[in-house]
Amino acid sequence: MQSRTALVTGGAQGLGLAIGGRLVSDGFDVVLADVDGEAVLEAADLIGATGVRMDVTDDAAVASVFAELPDGQLDVLVNNAGIISRQPASEFDSVQWDREMAVNLGGAMRCSRAAFEMLTASANPSVLNLASVGSTFGLPQRLGYSTTKAGVLGLTRTLAAEWGPHGIRVNAIAPGYVETQMMRSGFATGALDESRLLDRTPLGRFGTADEIAAAASFLASADASFVTGIVLKVDGGITIDGSFHARPHPAGSLSRTDPI
């Protein structure tokens, strides 16, 4: 069988590393790219991948990495690189705004653009963009992040429509609250309330990086060969829960005074 190559941005930790590891187990030759060159080399060693330093905000750096992919081959691109800041919208720093736009949204555009020619030569090419519950919710204190993740959906749909005739599938994964360093930082600063999040999630728990990686595995596979332009929410149901009352009691525990 011909080898398949996948490139995962923001691959030094968290979701990027988990997705890279899953794609390795699926038989891909995986290239992890990250702005932290030392960390991505260590991460790549852990999963049997190749690690490269790449700043997704720099056109030349992106072009250089794609030009050096083994055999000039690419089958799957995972645009995962992202950053977040938390501050009131009325005080949002312009420099940080530009930075989040450049990394979260601009990075996905630059890497997709650089990947196009190689993807057209693949038998099953696809692009996976990492969106977020922030693509659905308004997230107070995270103006830049929410705006970029909403933009990722527009990018996904436009590329899916334009590149479909070339056989390139483009989809987005929208994770919910997943056990990562980024989410835990929100608990540490008080920006997120753990108990409230759990109460608003129908499945009653946080997700794992491996569950996001499993969704990426499906969308990158031939099993998803007729799937393009979608946003796959992997969020435990948090974005569809319209209940604003206390969780119901377990079956059989209602008393005559319990509201129904």
Image (cartoon, rainbow, N blue to C red):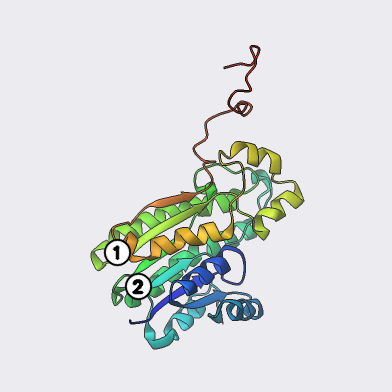
Res 253 → quadrant = top right
Q: Position of residue 258 (x, y in %)?
A: 64, 16
Res 178 seen here? yes
Q: Which mark is residue 106?
A: none
Quickly name the residue at label 2: 116
Above or below 154: residue 109: below
Say whether disc 2 or disc 1 marks the residue closer to the N-terminus: 2
Task: Assign a secondary structure to mark 1.
Answer: helix
Q: Do tag 2 and tag 1 residues touch (Cβ < 8 Å)?
A: yes
Q: Quadrant of the N terminus?
A: bottom left
As shown in the figure, which amino acid type bears the numbered disc 2? Phe
Give whichever of 6, 159 is nearer the camera: 6
Residue at (66% x, 80% y) in the render: 38
Residue at (50% x, 44% y) in the render: 136
Q: Where is residue 255 in the image (x, y as percent from the top left)?
A: 65, 16
In the image as oriented, which residue stretches furthest toward the top?
256
Give whichever of 197, 251 is nearer the camera: 251
Give the Cα separation between the discs numbered 2 and 1: 9 Å
Res 236 → quadrant = top right
Residue at (71% x, 46% y) in the render: 191
Quickly name the residue at label 1: 163
Above or below 29: residue 209: above
Q: Is residue 10 left or right of residue 113?
A: right
Above or below 187: residue 112: below
Q: Where is residue 49 in the image (x, y as percent from the top left)?
A: 53, 80
As shown in the figure, which amino acid type bears the numbered disc 1? Trp
